[in-house]
């Protein structure tokens, strides 16, 4: 009997983290995340689970982000009833994140069913329901950082602070292989060195196999200290409030909202900014903020007590719809934070609709905006955006700050890896686009003197035979759930990018330039065999609107 390691997610993509280890005593999972991104990748969520969940003994969860935990309810929907181990704050976050995700799944299925009804097609069911999320929550088991647990025969594990979000962990695992032990390290997502709430990521050294994320494997951020970041935020806030309008910040419910609240609270306390009111308008972010308050004693970098954290008298943390609507009447002097962070869903869309049109308002982006999202449309300089079916002119000032990141950059990943070495067997690079992990691989080879076959870039559903003294022998799954090429090229995304660029081009040039562009495209279409449009060369084609980013 050998030990095998299977990559069922985050292999060639960033999302869908899921690893399965099969050993002589049974099998277990590390993470079971939702696939997010383009449609081909998202469709993986709907495909059958590539193993029988009922054969799994237990699961070890690195952190509560939905791309690591979002398919847990699906496992329970498929009949699994085993325990999942996690830190206490992770268990606290799941309490809200899994039901929230179930609500999104149910909503999406309802919308899709309505669409299908109109075409006379069969209804669809959700990926999982609220009852599946509630079932999953019953099977949480918690463990502290730094102490060994024995979740099953022949396996022991230890959680280490990964400095990524509250409760996040790298997991050290020992698996019995005959009379030997194989030592594994799963990085989880690794945080940057400079971060509010936590010190640097931790972990021991010396393994047989290391699995490391590579989200920013090829990218270097400007170095900054927490003080410098707060200074940059202060300038953005003072400039925004100086314009007389509101400052709207689309923000993620977990971590980013709390970091911003904390930084804004510190700036108010020291008299460096003077907003009239500060809103965090998101039922989920509000509940998540409660989890942060509860575990504030675990934070390394915060001097305040739990009762002082997020408690400035100007803060309004809002859940009720009526209170959210009341914000509409405020025309200036307020900081309004709301989810989602990419502005493609949630209450932020109402606040953008109200404020984008105001010339004295400011919208500040503090996170990555994926192509195709409303946030990306606004940030890329569009003059109008479709929100809730209405075309809203953009008159507000649009700003962005890049230094609120929950991920380690290239150098920080290199540091983390070199502090974990040696890896006698291999290093697997996961959870990153190919470009990022290739860059990281090249850097590790030259810096740490490892051979090429010791740094492996697994593809989806690949598996490897592990041994206590050697390089992993590779085997590829007989059937792959996705064509690896599809992961990167998806026509839906290409189409939305194309229409946005075309629309911008058609809005910006002179009339003659616009006509020339349209004629060139018409000619190209004719050359490809498309029937000529009714008014070719006499009536311009109707300009394509910016992609409607609406649910
Ligand atoms: Zn994460």
Image (cartoon, rainbow, N blue to C red):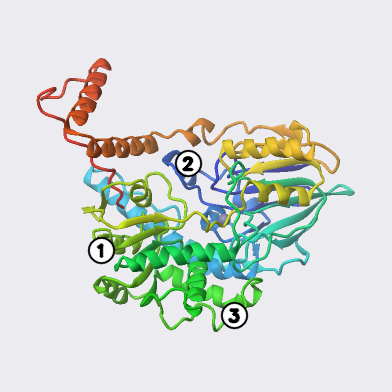
In the rendered structure, which disc, 3 or 1, sits on the residue that comes first in sequence?
3
Specify the quadrant of the image occupied by residue 534. Answer: top left
Q: Residues within 10 Å of mark 1 (few under 14, many from 20)?
A: some
Ligand 1 resides in the quarter of the picture at bottom right
* Residue ID at (49%, 62%): 232
In the rendered structure, which disc, 2 or 3, sits on the residue that comes first in sequence?
2
Query: Do the residues under discs 3 and 1 have CB atoms within 8 angstroms?
Result: no
Name the one closer to the observer, 111 or 305: 305
Query: Where is residue 298 drawn, in percent x and y?
Result: 65, 74
In 3D space, how far apart are the residues under numbered discs 2 and 3 (Cα atoms)?
Answer: 42 Å
Q: Secondary structure at mark 1?
A: helix
* Residue ID at (69%, 59%): 201
In the rendered structure, which disc, 2 or 1, sits on the residue that comes first in sequence?
2
Label placed on residue 304: 3
Q: Residues within 10 Å of mark 3 (few under 14, many from 20)?
A: few
Q: Nearer the viewer, mark 2 or mark 3?
A: 3
Residue that label 2 marks:
41
Query: Where is residue 488 drawn, in percent x and y?
Result: 49, 35
Query: Where is residue 49 drawn, in percent x and y?
Result: 55, 46
Q: Secondary structure at mark 2?
A: helix
Name the one closer to the observer, 204 or 209: 204
Residue that label 1 marks:
354
Query: Where is residue 335 drawn, in percent x and y?
Result: 37, 70
| Residue 330 higher or lower than 76, as above or below | below
Q: Is residue 321 left or right of residue 99?
A: left
Q: Is residue 321 left or right of residue 217?
A: left
| Residue 525 higher or lower than 172, as above or below | above
In 3D space, how far apart are the residues under numbered discs 2 and 1 (Cα atoms)?
Answer: 34 Å
Quadrant position of the N terminus in the picture: top right
Specify the quadrant of the image occupied by residue 450. Answer: top right
* Residue ID at (52%, 75%): 266
């Amino acid at each position: 009997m050998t030990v095998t390691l299977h990559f069922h997610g985050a292999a060639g993509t960033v999302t869908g983290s899921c690893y399965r280890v099969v050993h002589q005593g049974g099998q277990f999972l590390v993470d079971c995340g939702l696939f997010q991104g383009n449609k081909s990748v998202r469709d993986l969520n709907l495909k059958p689970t590539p193993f029988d969940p009922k054969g799994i003994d237990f699961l070890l969860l690195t952190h509560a982000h939905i791309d690591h935990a979002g398919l847990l309810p699906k496992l329970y929907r498929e009949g699994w009833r085993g325990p999942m181990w996690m830190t206490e704050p992770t268990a606290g976050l799941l309490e809200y994140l899994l039901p929230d995700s179930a609500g999104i799944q149910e909503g999406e299925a309802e919308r899709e069913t309505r669409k299908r009804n109109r075409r006379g097609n069969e209804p669809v069911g959700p990926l999982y329901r609220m009852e599946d999320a509630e079932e999953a929550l019953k099977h949480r088991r918690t463990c502290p950082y730094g102490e060994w647990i024995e979740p099953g025969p022949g396996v022991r594990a230890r959680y280490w602070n990964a400095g990524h979000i509250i409760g996040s962990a790298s997991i050290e695992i020992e698996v019995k292989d005959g009379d030997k032990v194989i030592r594994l390290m799963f990085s989880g997502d690794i945080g940057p060195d400079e971060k509010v709430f936590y010190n640097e990521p931790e972990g021991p050294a010396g393994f047989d196999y290391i699995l490391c994320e590579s989200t920013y494997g090829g990218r270097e951020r400007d170095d900054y200290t927490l003080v410098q970041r707060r200074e940059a935020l202060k300038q953005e806030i003072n400039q925004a409030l100086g314009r007389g309008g509101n400052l709207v910040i689309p923000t993620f419910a977990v971590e980013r909202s709390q970091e911003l609240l904390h930084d804004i609270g510190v700036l108010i306390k020291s008299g460096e900014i003077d907003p009239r009111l500060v809103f965090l308008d998101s039922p989920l972010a509000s509940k998540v903020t409660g989890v942060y308050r509860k575990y504030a004693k675990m934070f390394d970098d915060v001097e305040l007590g739990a009762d002082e954290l997020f408690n400035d008298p100007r803060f309004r943390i809002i859940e009720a719809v009526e209170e959210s609507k009341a914000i509409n009447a405020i025309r200036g002097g307020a900081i309004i934070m709301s989810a989602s962070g990419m502005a493609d869903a949630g209450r932020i869309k109402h606040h953008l609709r109200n404020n984008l049109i105001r010339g004295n308002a400011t919208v500040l982006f503090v996170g990555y905006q994926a192509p195709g999202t409303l946030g990306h449309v606004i940030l890329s300089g569009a003059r109008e955006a479709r929100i809730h079916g209405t075309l809203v002119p953009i008159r507000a000032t649009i700003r962005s700050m890049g230094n609120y990141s929950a991920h380690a950059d290239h150098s920080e990943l290199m540091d983390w890896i070199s502090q974990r070495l040696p890896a006698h067997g291999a290093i697997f690079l996961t959870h990153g686009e190919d470009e990022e992990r290739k860059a990281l691989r090249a850097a590790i080879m030259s810096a740490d003197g490892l051979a090429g076959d010791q740094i492996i870039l697994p593809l989806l559903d690949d598996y490897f035979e592990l041994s206590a003294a050697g390089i992993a022998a590779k085997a590829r799954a007989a059937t792959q759930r996705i064509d690896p090429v599809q992961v990167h090229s998806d026509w839906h995304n290409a189409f939305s990018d194309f229409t946005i660029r075309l629309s911008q081009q058609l809005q910006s040039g002179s009339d003659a330039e616009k006509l020339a562009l349209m004629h060139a495209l018409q000619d190209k279409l004719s050359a490809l065999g498309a029937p000529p449009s009714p008014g070719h060369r006499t009536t311009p084609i109707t300009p394509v609107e910016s992609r409607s980013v609406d649910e």
